[in-house]
């Protein structure tokens, strides 16, 4: 067959002046849709001139779900080969590989130099950890020079900047990510190879920066990557946790938590900034005084001062044009050591204050089942917010002194969920008690700088703190919160709902009851100028279900920004073989213009391209099979269908639904060993919060079922179940490229957005999911034929609850479901221990099945049967996988950030020379 060579398309640059209120320009698509077109390889490697990022315009309307409880799949908009609107800038794209003039020989010399002078060793005795540190130090020569230039540029241009406050930043490993973004990945690999070192083995020496729990922290990491890539002035603020979340192991199938000592031997990517240390007060009491003019003055006398020590981690944008920083705060005692107590023989007592202070940044999400745990969590949140607000003010005053008139113009603070919301009363406290502003002026500033992202509709995630705890830890802030609440209820709330005490009680920041509580979600809405959800349906539910009265008061306050993920880490870096294949057909700038991956869309039915694409998928599965063997000693067949569910363990994410379907498949195979299904490997990755009992029971049940299924010769290896321990970013980077099926099965209306669904689809996994969160938009982009949707819709869930949901009805009406659930009460999976898995069954029957697993089981089972049939048709499956990869441009975090810029932050890029 003769193959026609298609010249690579070159992006055109349209120079326009960027202004703060710029709107995304609309670029009309011109795409050829020739059926079964032969692969078109590019013949040149000239650098494309283009914008720094292609923007996909998110639909501003939300698809309304059917009112009836039927599980019939609503029609999803089909996607044709179209282009996304592109943001115009005057930037010229330069391939990072061509930007930094560092040869392999020079890089090798740099690594050896740092092996000698930084690590104090030589090539003959250095271990892999020393080689990793030396390589990182060599790369830092490039990175920190760009950090300095970026900061000088931002200061010189007096830029407006966004300050992204997040309790979580799930950064993962940085060596490969940074090498990818500066274009030195291949040269680093070659340099280490010439030094007789295995690049991948060296990279495995790096611990994950596991400063997060799940999607919230990973989203924050993607966002700061995109902020740097788009050359936007920004700084991330978080906590320098000593142990991150926890290191998960399994003992007899049960989760065991161990400290995650990610920086036990130091972290080469971070640098301490003692010149920016902050002192943070807690506890104590508030004194009310009057000055000479009779004005009331509040003086907080703290009971303890905590020192906040900043550590900066460089955030390298693609091409390293801009390298912003992530500033992480470490807590220390203000008085380092009590010599008097020590000399008097109190060797342990002399360090009590030190230990108490350092506990604040010791662990992410300390267990809050106890009063002490709740107190520690509140202090932890206040500590990082107070450090960050003081640091923001320090930076502002360095340029503007005591002129506060430009503060709102220069500063925007994004609150990532409710954890940082205490920053609002903290800024009010500083402006009034330290600067001396009147209330109205201080409040205008606060409402002008804070914006709030809501990530969930779950009540437990909309934090509430007891008034008594607030009064103990932050007495001045409680006074300010009461004043904010009083002015709101008696002002704008009374105007909107005159005399309606029921609405006022609902909107009040203070929740009345047996124990008065401070509602941080309400404080966030009242104190912010914008509130956004993270997917179209989620944002609609925020307005209609979560905050309808607030939306009635401030109709312009609520907006949507659909989440996104960075294709640099989640395709180019973690799936280099697929990235290389895309390089052959798309312009070189596709990592910053993801819509250009649509170049492979026309090849989705081409037999040769399908084979190359699926060969890459198979090889990724071979590599994951090795990881599975190493971590679990389970042998899996790479030709089997790899069905992956990776997310934190929570009932609403419904790992238990996945489990009961696996048990149903196992039962079918026992009844008929020749049951018609492809070989399947179900792979889980998840951590359960230490205090979340049922989540831990679900993990235990999955592991015990896996033990039985994997060792039952009667089913002829047609079914395997794997729970990989210690799920984290670096493990996800191995799992996602190998996935055939992406499990996105949360109860409709519970998942705000999800980001794992985007990463998996980008790497060619077919989504089986509910119409929840971003699944709806993924179905619209990929096309309804390239996803498998099941289950109740949001409206269907509401109607079923209104009619009265009884899980026992489903239990008795479905023989297979009943048999599977009854298995939990036996000792079939736990020999000699009958009923040890019964907690899962009780949650689904006795406790009401709050997340409707049984209501959706039949539909889910049918969806999985459809997956089986599709997977058997290799051509159809390959086409679906390719189109998923090609059509995920909307879910680029660059697009998300541009939406924030256009609709909320009003930033301008700052070009760094």
Image (cartoon, helix red, strand yellow):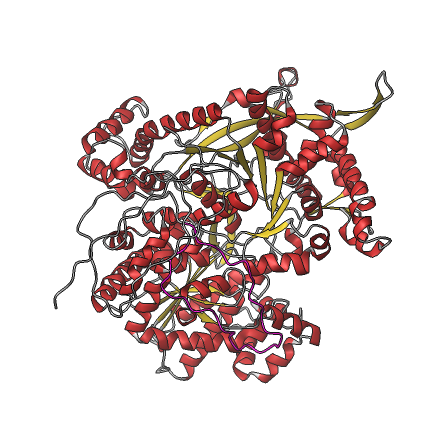
Quadrant position of the N terminus in the picture? bottom left
* Residue 288 in picture, x, y percent from top left: 83, 25
Q: Quadrant of residue 120?
A: top left
> Measuring 36% from the left and 75% from the top, which residue is drawn there?
870
Please tell me whether residue 613 is drawn above or below residue 43 in the rendered image.
below
Q: Is residue 523 left or right of residue 456?
A: right
Magenta residue check for 67: yes
Residue situated in front as seen by the camera: 669 or 727: 727
Residue situated in front as seen by the camera: 90 or 106: 90
* Residue 855 in picture, x, y percent from top left: 59, 75
Residue situated in front as seen by the camera: 461 or 552: 552
Whether residue 237 is visible: no
Q: Is residue 653 left or right of residue 118?
A: right
Please tell me whether residue 501 is drawn above or below residue 164 in the rendered image.
below
* Residue 233 in picture, x, y percent from top left: 48, 34
Q: Main secondary structure of the magenta part?
A: loop
* Magenta region, residue range: 55-84
> Measuring 72% from the left and 55% from the top, which residue is drawn there?
552
> Measuring 63% from the left and 31% from the top, which residue is drawn there?
386
Magenta residue check for 912: no
Quadrant position of the C terminus in the picture? top left
């Amino acid at each position: 067959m003769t193959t026609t060579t298609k010249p690579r398309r070159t992006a055109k640059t349209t120079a326009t002046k960027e202004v703060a209120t710029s709107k995304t320009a609309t670029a009309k698509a011109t795409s050829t849709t020739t059926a079964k077109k032969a692969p078109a390889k590019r013949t040149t490697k000239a650098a494309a001139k283009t914008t720094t990022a292609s923007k996909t315009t998110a639909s501003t309307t939300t698809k309304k779900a059917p009112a009836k409880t039927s599980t019939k799949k609503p029609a999803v908009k089909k996607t044709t080969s179209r282009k996304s609107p592109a943001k115009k800038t005057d930037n010229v794209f330069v391939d990072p590989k061509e930007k930094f003039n560092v040869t392999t020989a020079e890089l090798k010399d740099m690594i050896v130099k740092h092996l000698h002078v930084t690590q104090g060793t030589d090539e003959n005795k250095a271990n892999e950890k020393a080689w990793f540190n030396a390589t990182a130090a060599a790369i830092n020569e490039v990175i920190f020079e760009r950090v300095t230039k970026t900061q000088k540029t931002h200061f010189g241009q007096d830029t407006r900047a966004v300050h992204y406050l997040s309790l979580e930043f799930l950064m993962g490993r940085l060596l490969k990510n940074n090498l990818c973004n500066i274009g030195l990945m291949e040269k680093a690999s070659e340099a280490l190879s010439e030094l007789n070192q295995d690049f991948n083995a060296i990279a495995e020496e790096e611990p994950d920066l596991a400063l997060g729990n799940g999607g919230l922290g990973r989203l924050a990491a993607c966002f700061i990557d995109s902020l740097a890539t788009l050359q936007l002035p920004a700084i991330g603020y978080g906590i320098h946790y000593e142990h991150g979340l926890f290191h998960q192991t399994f003992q007899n199938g049960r989760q065991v938590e161990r400290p995650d000592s990610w920086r036990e031997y130091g972290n080469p990517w971070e640098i301490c900034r003692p010149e920016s240390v902050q002192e943070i007060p807690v506890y104590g009491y508030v004194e009310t005084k009057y000055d000479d003019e009779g004005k009331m003055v509040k003086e907080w006398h703290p009971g303890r001062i905590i020192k906040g020590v900043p550590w900066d981690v460089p955030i390298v944008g693609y091409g390293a044009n801009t390298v912003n920083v992530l500033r992480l705060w470490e807590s220390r005692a203000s008085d380092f050591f009590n010599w008097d107590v020590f000399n008097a023989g109190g060797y342990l007592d002399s360090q009590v204050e030190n230990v108490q202070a350092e506990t604040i940044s010791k662990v992410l999400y300390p267990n809050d089942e106890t009063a002490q745990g709740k107190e520690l969590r509140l202090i932890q949140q206040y500590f990082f917010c107070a450090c960050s607000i003081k640091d923001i003010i320090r930076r502002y005053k360095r340029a503007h002194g005591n002129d506060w008139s430009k503060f709102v113009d220069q500063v925007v603070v994004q609150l990532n969920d409710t954890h940082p919301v205490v920053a609002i009363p903290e800024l009010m406290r500083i402006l009034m008690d330290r600067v001396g502003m009147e209330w109205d002026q201080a409040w205008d500033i606060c409402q002008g700088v804070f914006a709030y992202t809501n990530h969930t509709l779950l009540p437990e995630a909309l934090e509430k703190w007891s008034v008594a705890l607030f009064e103990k830890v932050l007495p001045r802030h409680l006074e300010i919160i009461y004043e904010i609440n009083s002015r709101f209820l008696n002002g704008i709330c009374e105007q909107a709902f005159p005399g309606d005490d029921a609405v006022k009680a609902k909107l009040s920041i203070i929740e009345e009851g047996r124990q008065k509580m401070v509602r941080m979600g309400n404080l966030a809405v009242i104190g912010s100028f914008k509130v956004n959800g993270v997917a179209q349906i989620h944002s609609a539910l925020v307005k209609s279900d979560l905050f309808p009265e607030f939306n009635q008061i401030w109709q312009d306050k609520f907006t949507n920004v659909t989440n996104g993920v960075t294709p640099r880490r989640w395709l180019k870096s973690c799936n280099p073989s697929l990235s290389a294949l895309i390089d052959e057909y798309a312009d070189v700038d596709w990592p910053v213009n993801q819509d250009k991956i649509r170049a492979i869309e026309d090849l989705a039915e081409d037999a040769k391209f399908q084979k190359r694409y699926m060969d890459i998928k198979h090889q990724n599965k071979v590599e994951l099979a090795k990881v599975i063997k190493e971590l679990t000693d389970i042998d899996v067949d790479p030709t089997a269908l790899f069905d992956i569910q990776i997310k934190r363990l929570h009932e609403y994410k419904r790992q238990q639904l996945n489990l009961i379907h696996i048990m149903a498949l196992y039962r079918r195979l026992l009844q008929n060993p020749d049951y018609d299904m492809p070989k399947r490997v179900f792979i889980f990755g998840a951590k359960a919060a230490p205090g979340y009992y049922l989540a831990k029971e679900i993990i235990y049940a999955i592991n015990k079922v896996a033990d039985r299924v994997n060792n039952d010769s009667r089913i002829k290896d047609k079914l395997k179940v794997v729970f990989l321990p210690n799920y984290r970013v670096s493990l996800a980077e191995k799992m996602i490229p190998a996935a055939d099926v992406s499990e996105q099965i949360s109860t409709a209306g519970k998942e705000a957005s999800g980001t794992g669904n985007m990463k998996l689809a980008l790497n060619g996994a077919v989504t089986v999911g509910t119409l929840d969160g971003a699944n709806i938009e993924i179905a619209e982009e990929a096309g309804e034929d390239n996803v498998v949707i099941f289950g109740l819709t949001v409206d269907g869930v509401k109607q079923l609850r209104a009619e009265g949901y009884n899980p026992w009805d489903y239990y008795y009406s479905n023989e297979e479901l009943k048999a599977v659930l009854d298995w939990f009460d036996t000792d079939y999976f736990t020999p000699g221990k009958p009923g040890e898995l019964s907690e899962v069954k009780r949650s689904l029957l006795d406790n009401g099945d709050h997340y409707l697993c049984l209501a959706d089981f039949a539909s889910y089972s049918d969806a999985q049967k459809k997956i089986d049939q599709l997977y058997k048709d290799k051509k159809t499956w390959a086409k679906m996988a390719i189109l998923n990869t090609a059509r995920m441009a909307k879910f680029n975090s660059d697009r998300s950030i541009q939406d924030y810029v256009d609709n909320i932050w009003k930033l301008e890029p700052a070009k760094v020379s």
